[in-house]
Amino acid sequence: MQNKILITGIVACLLCFSSYSQDKKLKQKRALPKEVVIDSIIEPSKPINPLSPAKAAFYSAILPGLGQAYNKKYWKIPIVYAAIGTGVYFYIDNNKQYNRYRDAYKRRLAGFADDEFYFDAQGNPLTTPRVSTDRLEDAQKLFRRNKELSLLVAIGLYALNIIDANVDAHLLQYNVDENLSLSPHYKLNEFDATSSLGLTLNFKF
């Protein structure tokens, strides 16, 4: 009789425990949301435009400084115009001086004595010219060489403006993500008191 009572008690306990477990599982299922939303922020990288460098170079070829404006490097525009403008200024000035001495030289060869160098600063005629014929010839060579050099400098600066816009457009598309870094490190060995210097490459996924 006692055995039956003990067995009945054990079975009753097991049934109660099973019922409690099922209740607990049901409550857990009800507590779970229907949808699990994972909040994540993904920063998409800027798409690389392979035509961007070509566009920047083309714009600078049409109008100096326009490629720099396309690359949003506005501070370079005054530098571009100052550089090219300086070359153009010296070319115009040297060309003007060259024409002065050439015209006077041609008048001398034609037998005239009425070029500007036969007069002083006030416009009074002189018996002998301020600049001799040989000096006129030398001055023509000097200013012709200078104007050709000025033209080459202006053309070179114009080409440099195009190259600068093209290279800038290339560099703007490089990946400079903070997850990728290269930094020096210094380590001191505590056992033998020696030190080592190296580089550490960090890459975060």
Image (cartoon, rainbow, N blue to C red):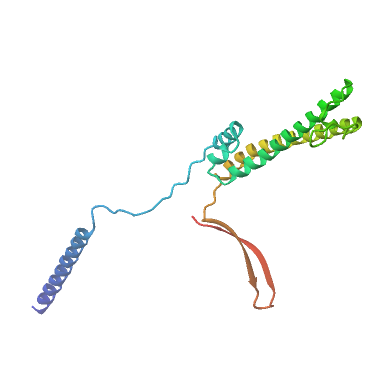
Q: From what the image shows, is residue 135 above or below residue 17? A: above
**Which residue is found at the position 89% from the left and 22% from the top?**
109
- x and y percent of residue 24 in the render? 19, 65
Of residues 94 and 7, the one drawn nearer to the viewer in this rendering? 94
- Residue farthest to the top? 110
Quarter the N terminus occupies? bottom left
- x and y percent of residue 165 in the render? 60, 40
Of residues 156 and 110, the one drawn nearer to the viewer in this rendering? 110
- Residue farthest to the left? 1
Q: From what the image shows, is residue 149 above or below residue 179? A: above
Q: Quadrant of residue 106?
A: top right
- Residue farthest to the front? 124
Of residues 43 and 23, the one drawn nearer to the viewer in this rendering? 43
Q: From what the image shows, is residue 133 above or below residue 172? A: above
Q: In this view, does 185 lie to the left or right of 148?
A: left
**Which residue is found at the position 84% from the left and 35% from the top?**
142
- x and y percent of residue 26 in the render? 18, 60
- x and y percent of residue 5 in the render? 9, 76
